[in-house]
Every structure is written in structure tokens, then in C-alpha cells.
Image (cartoon, grey):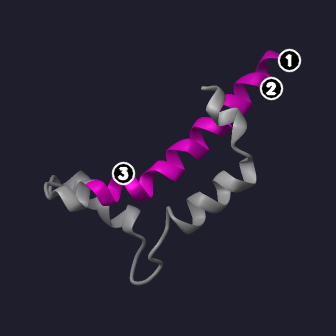
Amino acid sequence: MSFLDNISLPTLIMAALLLGLAPFVPEPHVLEKLRMLMAGELSKPMDIFDLLLHGTPWLLLFAKLARMGARIGKE
């Protein structure tokens, strides 16, 4: 996971906020797609792509924060 070390934390935060929450109105796509997933309605390829597109920045951000936390815990 050294690629996570090469991405700065501010860059991941901005990506999560901008791409991860876009479009902002009427509700962020990632929330809409997560609701569809929980309801078992996520079946169209476009909806699955939307979830991956808008969810990836959040996953990368959480992975980086977990990696940083693990490093601090070892010290």
C-alpha cells in the first residue's frame, strides 16, 4: 500500500469532499447509492459505477487514516 503514502492527506480529503459528495443537491450520490445498496435496489450497472466512483475517495481516505493510525500506534 505504498501508493497511499504517495498521496497527500489534504488531496484525499479534497477528493472525498468534492468527488465523494458530488452532486451536493438534492443529496450526495454516495448517500443515495448506499441507501439503494441497503435496500437491495442497486442493480443497474450505472448505479454500481456511481457507487464505485463516489465511494473510492472515501475508501482511500479511510485506508490512509487507518495506515497513519497504525504507524502512530507502533511508536
Label 3 Cα neighbours within 10 Å, binned few <14 / some 14-19 / many ≥20 = some
Q: Please state the horizontal and vertical placement of residue 72, each as a whole percent of the image.
A: 80, 26
Prevalent SS, magenta region: helix
Q: Amino acid at mark 3?
A: Leu
Identify which residue is drawn at 59% across, 59% down.
Answer: 15
- Please say if 68 is above or below 37: above
Query: Tag 2, which secondary structure?
Result: helix
Label 2 Cα neighbours within 10 Å, binned few <14 / some 14-19 / many ≥20 = few
For discs 3 and 1, the disc positioned in front in the rendered view: 3
Identify which residue is drawn at 24% across, 60% down.
Answer: 47
Q: Give the Cα distance between marks 2 and 3.
A: 30 Å
Q: Give the Cα distance between marks 3 and 1.
A: 34 Å
- Looking at the image, residue 10 sits to the left or right of residue 3; the answer is right
Whether residue 59 appears in magenta in the rendering, the answer is yes
Residue 34 appears anywhere in the view: no
Name the quarter where the N terminus is drawn: top right
Q: To which residue does mark 1 refer? A: 75
- Looking at the image, residue 48 sits to the left or right of residue 31; the answer is left
Q: What is the residue that sits farthest to the right in this orientation?
A: 75
Q: To which residue does mark 3 refer? A: 52
Query: Tag 1, which secondary structure?
Result: loop
Q: Magenta region: which residues?
A: 49-75
Q: Please state the horizontal and vertical placement of residue 32, each as a whole percent of the image.
A: 32, 66
Q: To which residue does mark 2 refer? A: 72
Q: Which of the two discs, 3 and 1, labels the residue nearer the N terminus?
A: 3
Q: Please state the horizontal and vertical placement of residue 18, each as a whole percent of the image.
A: 57, 68
- Please say if 74 is above or below 30: above
Query: Tag 3, which secondary structure?
Result: helix
Q: Amino acid at mark 1?
A: Glu
